[in-house]
Amino acid sequence: MRLERIGIQKFRNIGDRGVEIDFTRQITVALGPNNAGKSNVLAATRLALDLGAGVGRNPSALNQYRRQPLHPPTFTLFFRGDKKIDGIVNSSGSETFWFKFQNGGTGGARVISDYWLMAEKNLHRLRELTHNVFNREFSYATPSEFHRFFATQALALFDKNFGSCIPPHYMIPEFRQIRNGEYTDDGAGLIALLDKYQHPDIGKDLDREKFDKIQDCVRQLLHDSDATLEVSSTDKTLIINADGIRLPLSSKGTGVHQLVIMLTAVLSHENSVICIEEPEIHLHPRLQREFISFIAKNTLNSYLISSHSHALIDLIGEVEILPIRFENGDAWGRPVEDDTHVLAALHDLGVQASDLLQSNCIIWVEGPSDRVYLRRWISLLRPSLLEGVHYSIMYYGGSLLAHASIDREYAVEELAKLLRINQHAAVIMDSDKSSPKSQVAAYKRRIVTECSATGSTSWLTKRREIENYIPPAVIASGLASLQRPALSVVLGEYEVFEDHIDQELKAQGAKPIFYGRKKAQLSRVFADAFTRNDITPQLHRELIPIIERIEEWNA
């Protein structure tokens, strides 16, 4: 019989949505910003383990949900069966069992429901359970009588068959310092303990193995295969011999101190649950990942870790990443399962692409002229948004967009995944409609759907092309700049811009501008002619969702 999961509800700021810790994963990392509730998850887990072990079953007002006595903390402990209690396994028809504890009220902890109370419709199974577990016969009992019996016997049943399956637990706090005194996992008495490990008594050879493991980890993490640890025989200081130079640990960086403290703590316990608060303190991101990988490969403990570090997200697959979110006054958490969850976790941690000298989002457009107009319009509506910092614009090259996808999980192999370039993406597409009833290309409709599904954004123009949003005054100003008659041309929503402009010029006996041949160059002329007042209400309505999304991605 082994503990498989712990569910937490109504503990401090953790509400009904709750958090579940999966002990089938060796390491769970609870990620989130300050005051999200990560430390409460660790505290709740330790309290649940104490309840299961029969320790600390008296309630504390500090643990009440929002300090409200009417909402006592609730913990659900899930177990997976084995041959230890065959009678329960055979009678229940399942290998998973659970008990729900409430820690509150004047009576202390109590079991408020368990696996068997859910089986009230199967009286035959309940009779088997009572016979196999309690050696009692209830040949003619009703469901309500079974309920009363189990309610009074559940805690005793738990203690007898399940309490011994609760592993011991230990806490490595965020404040860690090597100092004298009796050994604790925060660094007190550490040198005396390492001295004991380095020179173990007869019959304590396993202690020497622990010392060697700590030394091996220091070698790995310092990238020095010859580094050694030793405790001075005179003044009992810890010495590190690295690169042929023996120096006291005090001469090394604080990060090495933190490593030695945490390594000693995790190797001092076996088959236990170890809670670690913020192991990233004073550690380089690469060192953080290497430390987690080391304890996963070299210890038999289970770990619940709280952290603000986005560097640990890279360990998905090796560890369980559990983002803790605080919404509407309640903390809750669910494991990361896909790229969308990863993106949300990174956002909560304040990570932005600009931290790596990248723009925080990419706007995909068909070609250079679209970029010219879009950049001008954004600058007029939101001067604070800077291209290259808050957004970048990239080209997909017309119909080549048919070979791309904005889907995160289900894009077919033949399609290029645009979100792999930047997870914050907007796609702008000309509808290319020649009339109100014209059909938009299927791949463009697909892109719109994918953007909606992935939290990206898109703008499929209501008019034929970007150029169809240029008002008569801007056309006139642009033509004047090109030494042409300043014609105030009214362009229809579905007309071809270059054809219509050249026809109007020819009708006036003027030379055409051949816009289609020199789009990249001439688009700058017309874009520069725009003022804030030239942005029509329709263009404003269609632009604002794009701009607001850029602002959101840069929040």
Image: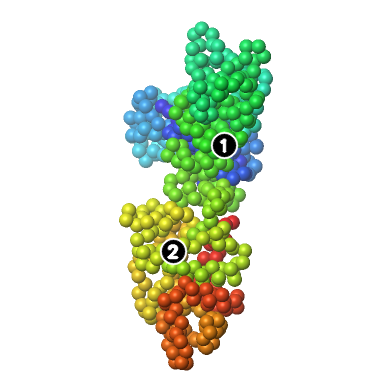
Q: Quadrant of residue 140?
A: top left
Instruction: Look at the picture and state if 494 lies above or below 77.
Output: below
Instruction: Look at the picture and state if 129 lies above or below 463.
Output: above
Indicate the amino acid at tag 1: His
What residue does disc 2 label?
395
What secondary structure is found at the residue carrying circle 1? loop
**Where in the figure is residue 302, as x and y percent of width and height?**
48, 30
Residue at screen point 52% across, 47% down: 345
Front residue (pair 298, 14): 298
First in sequence: mark 2 vs mark 1: 1
**Where in the figure is residue 387, as x and y percent of width and height?**
55, 62
Q: Quadrant for the C terminus, please.
A: bottom right
Indicate the amino acid at tag 2: Tyr
Q: CA distance from mark 2 to mark 1?
A: 37 Å
Q: Quadrant for the N terminus, please.
A: top left
- Residue 284 numbered mark, or none: 1
Q: Quadrant of residue 121?
A: top left
Furthest residue to the top? Answer: 202
Instruction: Give the left or right position of residue 377, taking residue 120 as reference.
Output: right
Crowding at dot 2, Cα within 10 Å, few <14 / some 14-19 / many 20+, comes out as: some
Q: Quadrant of residue 36?
A: top right
Asked whether residue 412 is in view, the answer is yes
Closer to us: mark 2 or mark 1? 2
Protein image colouring: rainbow
Residue at screen point 40% across, 31% down: 80
Asked whether residue 146 is in view, the answer is no
Residue at screen point 35% across, 70% down: 441
